[in-house]
Image: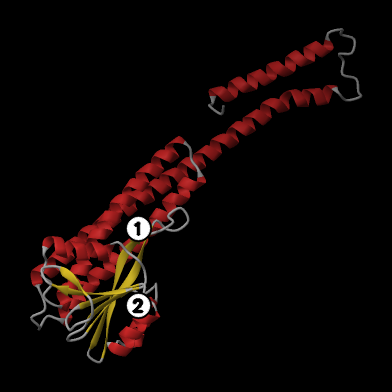
Amino acid sequence: MRNYLFCEAGFVEKPQWQPNCWVNVVCPDQNDFDFLTNELKVPQSFLNDIADIEERPRTETEGDWLLTLLRIPVAATNPEKDLPFTTVPIGIITNNEIIISVCYHQSDMLPDFIEHTRRKQINVRNKLDLILRLIYSSAVWFLKYLKQINTDITAAEKELERSIKNEDLLRLMRLQKALVYFNTSIRGNEVMVGKLRTIFQDTNFLDIELADDVVIELKQAYNTVNIYSDILTGTMDAFASIISNNVNTIMKRMTSFSIVLMIPTLIASFYGMNVDVHLDHIPSAFAIIVVVSFSLSALAFWVFRRIKWF
Protein backbone atom coordinates (compact mmCIF):
# COMPACT_ATOMS: atom_id res chain seq x y z
CA MET A 1 0.00 0.00 0.00
CA ARG A 2 1.33 3.43 -0.89
CA ASN A 3 0.14 7.00 -0.75
CA TYR A 4 1.51 10.28 -2.03
CA LEU A 5 1.85 13.11 0.45
CA PHE A 6 2.69 16.72 -0.28
CA CYS A 7 3.50 19.21 2.46
CA GLU A 8 1.01 22.10 2.54
CA ALA A 9 1.00 23.18 6.21
CA GLY A 10 0.98 19.49 7.02
CA PHE A 11 1.04 16.49 4.72
CA VAL A 12 -1.88 16.32 2.30
CA GLU A 13 -2.53 13.19 0.27
CA LYS A 14 -2.37 13.51 -3.52
CA PRO A 15 -3.94 11.18 -6.09
CA GLN A 16 -0.66 10.56 -7.91
CA TRP A 17 3.06 11.07 -7.57
CA GLN A 18 4.64 14.44 -8.28
CA PRO A 19 8.19 15.76 -7.75
CA ASN A 20 9.20 16.58 -4.15
CA CYS A 21 6.27 14.71 -2.66
CA TRP A 22 6.66 11.98 -0.06
CA VAL A 23 5.84 8.45 -1.22
CA ASN A 24 4.86 6.48 1.88
CA VAL A 25 4.90 2.71 1.26
CA VAL A 26 3.71 0.32 3.98
CA CYS A 27 3.61 -3.47 3.60
CA PRO A 28 4.44 -3.23 -0.12
CA ASP A 29 2.97 -5.64 -2.63
CA GLN A 30 4.22 -6.48 -6.12
CA ASN A 31 2.50 -3.45 -7.62
CA ASP A 32 4.37 -1.19 -5.18
CA PHE A 33 7.67 -2.88 -5.99
CA ASP A 34 7.09 -2.39 -9.71
CA PHE A 35 6.31 1.29 -9.20
CA LEU A 36 9.41 1.87 -7.06
CA THR A 37 11.88 -0.02 -9.23
CA ASN A 38 10.49 0.61 -12.72
CA GLU A 39 9.06 4.14 -12.50
CA LEU A 40 11.10 5.77 -9.73
CA LYS A 41 14.22 3.67 -10.43
CA VAL A 42 14.85 2.89 -6.75
CA PRO A 43 17.82 0.50 -6.31
CA GLN A 44 16.62 -3.03 -5.60
CA SER A 45 19.39 -3.50 -3.02
CA PHE A 46 17.83 -0.75 -0.88
CA LEU A 47 14.49 -2.55 -0.81
CA ASN A 48 16.20 -5.81 0.12
CA ASP A 49 18.08 -4.14 2.98
CA ILE A 50 14.87 -2.64 4.40
CA ALA A 51 13.18 -6.07 4.28
CA ASP A 52 15.79 -7.49 6.68
CA ILE A 53 14.20 -7.38 10.14
CA GLU A 54 17.62 -7.40 11.79
CA GLU A 55 18.96 -4.30 9.97
CA ARG A 56 20.45 -1.68 12.28
CA PRO A 57 20.22 2.11 11.76
CA ARG A 58 22.71 3.21 9.12
CA THR A 59 23.11 5.16 5.87
CA GLU A 60 24.09 3.92 2.43
CA THR A 61 24.55 5.66 -0.90
CA GLU A 62 24.23 4.38 -4.48
CA GLY A 63 24.65 6.94 -7.23
CA ASP A 64 22.63 10.00 -6.23
CA TRP A 65 20.39 7.88 -3.96
CA LEU A 66 20.68 7.98 -0.17
CA LEU A 67 19.22 5.25 2.05
CA THR A 68 18.63 6.11 5.71
CA LEU A 69 17.63 3.13 7.86
CA LEU A 70 15.92 3.72 11.20
CA ARG A 71 14.24 1.55 13.84
CA ILE A 72 10.71 2.36 14.97
CA PRO A 73 8.62 0.73 17.73
CA VAL A 74 5.57 -1.41 17.01
CA ALA A 75 3.07 -3.13 19.28
CA ALA A 76 2.46 -6.86 18.86
CA THR A 77 -0.87 -8.05 17.51
CA ASN A 78 -0.80 -11.01 19.91
CA PRO A 79 1.11 -9.95 23.07
CA GLU A 80 0.20 -13.17 24.91
CA LYS A 81 2.40 -15.23 22.58
CA ASP A 82 4.81 -12.71 21.07
CA LEU A 83 6.82 -9.87 22.53
CA PRO A 84 4.36 -7.12 23.54
CA PHE A 85 6.55 -4.53 21.81
CA THR A 86 9.42 -4.72 19.37
CA THR A 87 11.19 -2.60 16.77
CA VAL A 88 11.24 -2.85 12.98
CA PRO A 89 13.31 -1.12 10.28
CA ILE A 90 12.00 1.71 8.16
CA GLY A 91 13.96 3.01 5.19
CA ILE A 92 13.88 6.56 3.87
CA ILE A 93 15.16 6.63 0.29
CA THR A 94 15.94 10.05 -1.17
CA ASN A 95 17.58 11.82 -4.06
CA ASN A 96 17.30 15.40 -5.34
CA GLU A 97 13.54 15.31 -5.98
CA ILE A 98 12.24 12.00 -4.61
CA ILE A 99 11.46 11.09 -0.99
CA ILE A 100 10.29 7.55 -0.28
CA SER A 101 9.68 5.74 3.00
CA VAL A 102 9.34 1.97 2.97
CA CYS A 103 8.27 -0.15 5.92
CA TYR A 104 7.36 -3.83 5.68
CA HIS A 105 5.33 -3.75 8.91
CA GLN A 106 2.20 -1.95 10.08
CA SER A 107 2.80 0.64 12.78
CA ASP A 108 0.77 3.31 14.55
CA MET A 109 3.62 5.81 14.30
CA LEU A 110 3.36 6.81 10.63
CA PRO A 111 -0.41 7.59 10.55
CA ASP A 112 -0.01 9.48 13.82
CA PHE A 113 2.94 11.44 12.41
CA ILE A 114 0.98 12.44 9.29
CA GLU A 115 -2.01 13.48 11.38
CA HIS A 116 0.26 15.42 13.72
CA THR A 117 1.72 17.47 10.85
CA ARG A 118 -1.80 18.36 9.73
CA ARG A 119 -3.01 19.22 13.20
CA LYS A 120 0.02 21.39 14.01
CA GLN A 121 0.31 22.65 10.41
CA ILE A 122 3.99 21.74 10.35
CA ASN A 123 5.94 22.77 7.28
CA VAL A 124 8.52 20.13 6.35
CA ARG A 125 11.08 22.04 4.30
CA ASN A 126 13.17 19.23 2.82
CA LYS A 127 14.14 15.57 3.00
CA LEU A 128 16.38 16.01 6.05
CA ASP A 129 13.54 17.73 7.91
CA LEU A 130 11.33 14.74 7.18
CA ILE A 131 13.95 12.24 8.36
CA LEU A 132 14.62 14.16 11.58
CA ARG A 133 10.91 14.56 12.31
CA LEU A 134 10.38 10.85 11.76
CA ILE A 135 13.18 10.11 14.23
CA TYR A 136 11.60 12.57 16.68
CA SER A 137 8.23 10.85 16.24
CA SER A 138 9.86 7.45 16.86
CA ALA A 139 11.31 8.76 20.14
CA VAL A 140 7.84 9.97 21.18
CA TRP A 141 6.36 6.55 20.43
CA PHE A 142 9.21 4.83 22.28
CA LEU A 143 8.29 6.87 25.35
CA LYS A 144 4.59 6.11 24.87
CA TYR A 145 5.22 2.37 24.71
CA LEU A 146 7.62 2.60 27.66
CA LYS A 147 4.77 3.94 29.79
CA GLN A 148 2.69 0.91 28.80
CA ILE A 149 5.61 -1.38 29.63
CA ASN A 150 5.91 0.23 33.05
CA THR A 151 2.17 -0.32 33.62
CA ASP A 152 2.53 -3.98 32.58
CA ILE A 153 5.50 -4.42 34.93
CA THR A 154 3.49 -3.01 37.85
CA ALA A 155 0.53 -5.28 37.07
CA ALA A 156 2.78 -8.36 36.82
CA GLU A 157 4.45 -7.49 40.14
CA LYS A 158 1.07 -7.32 41.88
CA GLU A 159 0.10 -10.70 40.45
CA LEU A 160 3.40 -12.21 41.62
CA GLU A 161 2.93 -10.79 45.11
CA ARG A 162 -0.29 -12.80 45.40
CA SER A 163 1.00 -15.98 43.81
CA ILE A 164 4.17 -16.71 41.89
CA LYS A 165 3.14 -18.20 38.55
CA ASN A 166 5.20 -19.13 35.54
CA GLU A 167 2.94 -17.06 33.27
CA ASP A 168 3.72 -13.86 35.17
CA LEU A 169 7.45 -14.57 35.18
CA LEU A 170 7.38 -15.22 31.43
CA ARG A 171 5.45 -11.98 31.01
CA LEU A 172 8.22 -10.08 32.79
CA MET A 173 10.83 -11.86 30.70
CA ARG A 174 9.11 -10.76 27.47
CA LEU A 175 8.98 -7.18 28.73
CA GLN A 176 12.68 -7.34 29.53
CA LYS A 177 13.45 -8.50 26.00
CA ALA A 178 11.34 -5.65 24.60
CA LEU A 179 13.37 -3.17 26.67
CA VAL A 180 16.59 -4.60 25.22
CA TYR A 181 15.29 -4.06 21.67
CA PHE A 182 14.19 -0.54 22.57
CA ASN A 183 17.59 0.22 24.08
CA THR A 184 19.59 -0.80 21.02
CA SER A 185 17.18 0.84 18.57
CA ILE A 186 17.09 4.18 20.38
CA ARG A 187 20.86 4.20 20.63
CA GLY A 188 21.16 3.38 16.92
CA ASN A 189 18.76 6.21 15.97
CA GLU A 190 20.75 8.62 18.12
CA VAL A 191 23.96 7.68 16.32
CA MET A 192 22.10 8.11 13.02
CA VAL A 193 21.29 11.74 13.87
CA GLY A 194 25.01 12.41 14.28
CA LYS A 195 25.74 10.84 10.89
CA LEU A 196 23.03 12.91 9.20
CA ARG A 197 24.41 16.10 10.71
CA THR A 198 27.79 15.21 9.28
CA ILE A 199 26.38 14.40 5.83
CA PHE A 200 24.31 17.61 5.56
CA GLN A 201 26.50 20.00 7.57
CA ASP A 202 27.58 21.95 4.47
CA THR A 203 24.05 22.29 3.06
CA ASN A 204 21.07 24.50 3.82
CA PHE A 205 19.03 21.38 4.64
CA LEU A 206 20.19 21.14 8.26
CA ASP A 207 17.94 22.71 10.90
CA ILE A 208 20.26 22.74 13.93
CA GLU A 209 17.47 23.51 16.40
CA LEU A 210 15.37 20.60 15.13
CA ALA A 211 18.38 18.25 15.24
CA ASP A 212 19.08 19.28 18.85
CA ASP A 213 15.44 18.66 19.81
CA VAL A 214 15.60 15.19 18.26
CA VAL A 215 18.77 14.34 20.21
CA ILE A 216 17.20 15.56 23.48
CA GLU A 217 14.07 13.45 22.92
CA LEU A 218 16.15 10.38 22.07
CA LYS A 219 18.29 10.84 25.18
CA GLN A 220 15.16 11.03 27.31
CA ALA A 221 13.84 7.82 25.75
CA TYR A 222 17.25 6.16 26.20
CA ASN A 223 17.46 7.14 29.88
CA THR A 224 13.88 5.98 30.48
CA VAL A 225 14.65 2.59 28.92
CA ASN A 226 17.69 2.17 31.16
CA ILE A 227 15.69 3.10 34.28
CA TYR A 228 12.89 0.64 33.50
CA SER A 229 15.41 -2.04 32.53
CA ASP A 230 17.26 -1.66 35.85
CA ILE A 231 13.96 -1.78 37.76
CA LEU A 232 12.85 -4.89 35.89
CA THR A 233 16.21 -6.61 36.39
CA GLY A 234 16.03 -5.90 40.12
CA THR A 235 12.46 -7.20 40.23
CA MET A 236 13.38 -10.42 38.43
CA ASP A 237 16.35 -10.96 40.77
CA ALA A 238 14.16 -10.33 43.82
CA PHE A 239 11.53 -12.84 42.71
CA ALA A 240 14.25 -15.37 41.86
CA SER A 241 15.52 -15.02 45.44
CA ILE A 242 11.98 -15.38 46.79
CA ILE A 243 11.43 -18.56 44.75
CA SER A 244 14.74 -20.01 45.96
CA ASN A 245 13.88 -19.11 49.56
CA ASN A 246 10.44 -20.73 49.23
CA VAL A 247 12.01 -23.93 47.90
CA ASN A 248 14.44 -24.00 50.85
CA THR A 249 11.57 -23.48 53.30
CA ILE A 250 9.55 -26.30 51.77
CA MET A 251 12.54 -28.63 51.83
CA LYS A 252 13.18 -27.84 55.51
CA ARG A 253 9.55 -28.55 56.38
CA MET A 254 9.49 -31.79 54.44
CA THR A 255 12.73 -32.92 56.08
CA SER A 256 11.43 -32.04 59.55
CA PHE A 257 8.16 -33.84 58.85
CA SER A 258 10.06 -36.93 57.69
CA ILE A 259 12.19 -36.95 60.88
CA VAL A 260 9.10 -36.62 63.11
CA LEU A 261 7.44 -39.56 61.36
CA MET A 262 10.67 -41.56 61.36
CA ILE A 263 10.86 -41.76 65.19
CA PRO A 264 7.74 -43.93 65.80
CA THR A 265 8.56 -45.94 62.67
CA LEU A 266 12.06 -46.66 64.03
CA ILE A 267 10.77 -47.70 67.45
CA ALA A 268 8.05 -49.87 65.90
CA SER A 269 10.71 -51.51 63.72
CA PHE A 270 12.86 -52.40 66.74
CA TYR A 271 9.98 -53.82 68.74
CA GLY A 272 8.53 -55.62 65.75
CA MET A 273 11.59 -57.88 65.46
CA ASN A 274 11.28 -61.54 66.43
CA VAL A 275 13.68 -61.22 69.39
CA ASP A 276 13.42 -60.74 73.13
CA VAL A 277 12.41 -57.13 73.76
CA HIS A 278 12.13 -57.48 77.59
CA LEU A 279 8.59 -56.08 77.62
CA ASP A 280 6.62 -59.17 76.72
CA HIS A 281 5.74 -59.84 80.39
CA ILE A 282 4.20 -56.35 80.83
CA PRO A 283 0.45 -56.31 80.01
CA SER A 284 0.48 -52.68 78.80
CA ALA A 285 3.72 -52.95 76.76
CA PHE A 286 2.01 -51.94 73.52
CA ALA A 287 0.50 -48.81 75.06
CA ILE A 288 3.85 -47.87 76.59
CA ILE A 289 5.64 -48.20 73.24
CA VAL A 290 2.97 -46.10 71.49
CA VAL A 291 3.09 -43.38 74.17
CA VAL A 292 6.90 -43.24 74.09
CA SER A 293 6.91 -43.08 70.29
CA PHE A 294 4.44 -40.23 70.13
CA SER A 295 6.16 -38.43 73.00
CA LEU A 296 9.48 -38.50 71.18
CA SER A 297 7.77 -37.33 67.98
CA ALA A 298 6.12 -34.50 69.89
CA LEU A 299 9.51 -33.56 71.38
CA ALA A 300 11.09 -33.52 67.92
CA PHE A 301 8.19 -31.40 66.62
CA TRP A 302 8.64 -28.92 69.51
CA VAL A 303 12.38 -28.68 68.82
CA PHE A 304 11.80 -28.00 65.11
CA ARG A 305 9.21 -25.36 65.98
CA ARG A 306 11.71 -23.63 68.26
CA ILE A 307 14.31 -23.47 65.50
CA LYS A 308 11.56 -22.39 63.03
CA TRP A 309 11.79 -25.37 60.75
CA PHE A 310 8.01 -25.72 60.90
Q: Taking 52 as reference, is 95 left or right?
A: left
Q: Quadrant of the C terminus?
A: top right
Q: Residues within 10 Å of mark 2 (few under 14, many from 20)?
A: many
Which is more toward the observer, 195 or 152?
Answer: 152
Q: Position of residue 283 (x, y in %)?
A: 87, 7
Q: Position of residue 267 (x, y in %)?
A: 78, 23
Q: Can see residue 216?
A: no
Q: Identify the disc placed on residue 77.
A: none
Which is more toward the observer, 22 or 130?
Answer: 22
Q: Which residue carries the number 2 mark?
A: 50
Q: Position of residue 108 (x, y in %)?
A: 30, 61
Q: Taking 274 as reference, is 24 left or right?
A: left
> Of helix, strand and loop, which one carries label 2?
helix
Which is more toward the observer, 232 or 66?
Answer: 66
Q: Quadrant of the N terminus?
A: bottom left
Q: Taking 211 as reference, is 154 left or right?
A: right
Q: Taking 251 as reference, is 58 left or right?
A: left
**Between discs 1 and 2, the one toward the N terminus:** 2
Q: Which residue carries the number 1 mark?
A: 179
Q: Residues within 10 Å of mark 1 (few under 14, many from 20)?
A: many
Q: Residue at x 11, y 64 (%)?
A: 121
Q: Position of residue 246 (x, y in %)?
A: 52, 38
Query: Looking at the picture, which amino acid does disc 1 mark?
Result: Leu
Query: Looking at the picture, which amino acid does disc 2 mark?
Result: Ile
